[in-house]
Image (cartoon, rainbow, N blue to C red):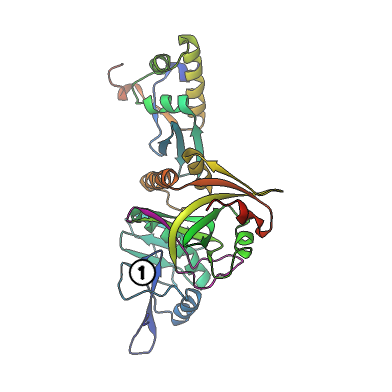
Amino acid sequence: MQTHAILGSGVPSHLDLLVGGLPLRLCSQDSELLSAATRRYDGFNGTRQKRFSIEIDALALPSAVESKFACEFEGATVVADADSARFSGVRHEYALDSLLRMWLSWALLPETGFLLHAATVTRNGKAYVFFGRSGAGKSTIASFSQAGTVFTDEISLLRRVDGEWRAFGTPFWGEFRADGTNRSAPLAGLFRLLQSPEDRVDPLRPADLLKALLPCVLFFSSRVDDHERLLEILATASCEVAGHNLQFQKNRSFWEVIPT
Amino acid sequence: MNAAAIGIWRKNPALAWREIENETVIISPDESVMHELNDTGSMVWRSIDGRRNAEALAALLVEQYEVTKEIALADTVALLDELTSRKLLVPVEAGERSAPR
């Protein structure tokens, strides 16, 4: 699949990606950065269909006067509007990766989606999403799951598509790198990870699920209306998707208590 | 009598909030802090409109729950005090006030 545009100089000028079903185009004159991004996001190649355009500069440019979203990370900044964004001060792929996460957390709002600190594993065509903050056991869960079934062990992307909640793999990985993760599946359930000497599952009421999800959602906007939209999306998910507390031991026995 | 008892309050416009299952989740984007209210707290929160004072809010609790006026007022004042100390409410200045209810 052709994902690079080659200029007369032979320098790739853009990279097309598909993340969470959203087609986006990274544009840069920095061939090394685009090459690194091509390797990093291998498996998430997009089509030429362009929904979002992201211009990337190594220089730290002054922020636009008016933008719907602005965020900063270690000297690199993202400013964005509905269909386009500019990443400035991006000197390496790690800065690019950080800004991409920040931007995506905001760009998903109109798509009824959000990013969650969670491992996603599939079974029988359904996605089981295990969420928790750092150290909760996401990579452990992934490592005790069957090869080829792990969408991500770090950041899951959840979206309501045609009235159905789906979990998508993302190119943002943790300790356990899964292969071929640019897939999606309908959600079977959301499981809050609680390490324990026993394996046990208890249902969560929608209100408790919402409160459990909030600290695990990646979100960087400081605007009140964005937070209102996020709460609306999370409340919808909490009412429509089964939520559970999962107490689990550090072995694969936890799958025995997961409701199917 | 403290400020919560005699003042009139409105929700801090810098907050996002959502009611779910008679509970309320409030987010302060500037501080990345989540606050929670139970069902009675949610009823008071929902009724804070920049016009009702503590007494008027307490009267709503008396209508809704089996509680005496004195207890409802004490609980309402305590809640308003807590909400203002967390900057979830801001005072309505005299010039902003519309007709009392």
The residue located at (55%, 54%) in the rendering is A130
- Chain that bears disc 1: A
Q: Please give the range of residues in magenta.
A: A162-182
- Which image quadrant is residue A67 in? bottom left
The residue located at (36%, 90%) in the rendering is A9
Residue lying at the far left of the rendered structure: B99
Q: Is mark 1 on a helix, strand or loop?
A: strand
Question: Residue A169 in magenta?
Answer: yes
Residue A166 percent location from the top left of the image:
42, 57
Question: Residue A16 in magenta?
Answer: no
Q: Tell me, yes or no, if residue A71 can be seen here.
A: no
Question: Of residues A62 and A248, which is closer to you in this image?
Answer: A248
Q: In this view, does B76 lie above or below B89?
A: above
Q: In this view, does A207 lie above or below A145?
A: above
The residue that label 1 is drawn on is A24
The residue located at (34%, 26%) in the rendering is B49
Q: Tell me, yes or no, if residue A17 can be seen here.
A: yes
Q: In this view, does B92 lie above or below A212?
A: above
The residue located at (51%, 32%) in the rendering is B86
- Please identify the dominant SS of the magenta region: loop
